[in-house]
Image (tube, rainbow, N blue to C red):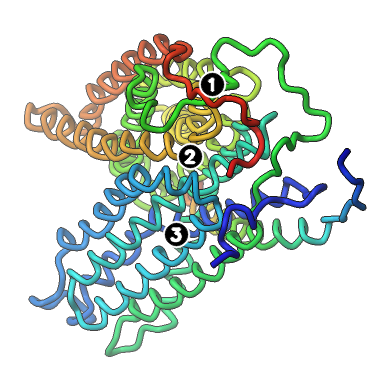
Amino acid sequence: MSFLARERTIAPPGYNRWLIPPAALCVHLCIGQAYAFSVFNLPMTKLIGIAKSAPTDWKLTELGWIFSLAIFFLGVSAAVFGRWVEEGGPRRAMFAAALCWSGGFFVAALGVYVHNIWIIYLGYGVLGGIGLGVGYISPVSTLIKWFPDRPGMATGMAIMGFGGGAFIASPLSVWLMHRFTTPTHIGVPETFLCLGAIYLCFMMVGAAIVRIPAPGWKPEGYVAPAQPKRLITTRDVYVYQALRTPQFWLIWWVLCLNVTAGIGVLGQASAMSQEMFPGRITAVAASGFVGLMSLFNMAGRFVWASTSDFIGRRNTYFVFFVLGFILYCTVPYTGKAGSVAGFVACFLVIISMYGGGFATVPAYLKDIFGTRYVGAIHGLLLTAWSAAGIFGPVIVNYMRQYQIDHNVPKAQAYNLTMYVMASLLVIGFFCNFFVKAVNERHYMKDDAKDTYGATA
Amino acid sequence: MQQQTPRKNYTLELILAWSFVGIPLAWGVIQTCINAAKLFSK
């Protein structure tokens, strides 16, 4: 399969680098479907009973594991296959991600057809999860190499696609299910087959057009700074050596705490808005609020990551932690004052910074550890996301229940949670504060190679 | 010295590639905006 080899993906002279972001988006828009998997939950509880759940139908608790497994395997595969992705090149990685991701849908369709949940766990959860992890990190270092002048903007564009994938998948899945559903059958397996085929084609286009820059290539007119900045290295740290540096673990906590603060409220936004403003925010309005939050989540990925190119990565996270702290402390007062507009504005900015945290971190890693293994190091860092996926919802849900059990009115049940989230951001601030340049002994010795060009 | 090769014009590829990802994304954003508008409707 020489077509997939790294050497075959080296761009010819004059290749337009603006073809690379669409290649990355082809992958990220597809794997972003994971955020929309919940649209299948209710239909999959009625596959046998059709009109209502039969005793042999699956329960929501069983179905919830499908998404959890996929996210777990995203983190594991990004960490395990990171080095393979980096050394094999982006086309091989995107190709593998396409096979795993679409294959996951095909296997899951079989699982629905024979009504065996374990086949779905294996298909969407394990195989699809591996596709998620490999696909998520596959374009990161390629984009950074093509855009040494704007690495934040470049990776922000791709990671924005992951946030936007659910926008496409959610209405598309609902429409497909509607088309294939009959009075005696719910069209979930056919929808899985269609989605698998669509995603396979889409991701293969991405794999076909992706290129890496030739050795020595630099953007026209780009001059690398003669005096390197203190927190931007021109050298490289080997992927597993990065694990031995305090910087990796500090950034791990920076990401984990930033994501924890956002993910907890993202999952509870609908219920929280209705409980804090009873009678003023209806269930329909709350679903609109969730939609608005997902738009800000996506836009924040691009805007904040692009901003980081100008103000620096560490300063961007300082903004997240300081502004986030102020906004989380403000939320209880908006509830007290009955200001729906203030409440909505606070959460839209918070959620934009949640997305921004994801999108800015690859460029942060590139600044600290160099370009060569940034994709693989990013893969290892994604375990912070998995951890935050547990911490965030647990903190929000358990604290709310604790407050309600202690006779706190529902409208005020989230106040303590907001202050806890604000204090997490204070810890994040200090973790970010302690990020310094990597000690000399951690850098790779063979630094003669060109950082911006392709490496064999 | 590197040989000068005529530069290929990538305009068509750029339009096709960005349309390929931009049109579905724009459709999804519009659908989400329609849903988000419910927040402001009585």
Q: Is residue A187 visible?
A: yes
- Residue at point 87%, 55% (across, down): B9
Distance between the Cα atoms at labels 3 and 2?
15 Å
Q: Which quadrant is home to the N terminus of chain A?
A: bottom right
Secondary structure beneath disc 3?
Answer: helix
- Mark 1 belongs to which amino acid? Arg
- Residue at point 7%, 32% (across, down): A405
How many C-alpha atoms fall within 10 Å of the one at disc 1: few (<14), some, or many (≥20)?
many
Is residue A62 or residue A403 the one in the foreground?
A: A62
Residue A164, x across and y down, in percent: 52, 51
Give the left or right position of residue A187, taking residue A413 as reference: right
- The first of marks 3 and 2 along the sequence is 3
- Residue at point 55%, 47% (across, down): A139
- Mark 2 belongs to which amino acid? Gly
Residue A232, x across and y down, in percent: 57, 18
The answer to whether tags 3 and 1 share a subunit is yes
Chain of the residue under the numbered disc 1 shown in the image: A
How many C-alpha atoms fall within 10 Å of the one at disc 3: few (<14), some, or many (≥20)?
many
Chain of the residue under the numbered disc 3 shown in the image: A
Which of the 4 image quarters holds residue A112?
Answer: bottom left
Give the left or right position of residue A369, taking residue A211 as reference: left
- Residue at point 27%, 48% (across, down): A72
Marks 3/2 in contact by CB < 8 Å: the verdict is: no
The residue at which mark 2 appears reads as A375
The residue at which mark 3 appears reads as A97
Give the left or right position of residue A116, taking residue A429 as reference: left
Is residue A16 or residue A355 the one in the foreground?
A: A16
| Number of the front mark, 3 or 1 | 3
Q: Residue A313 carries which label?
A: 1
Secondary structure beneath disc 2?
Answer: helix
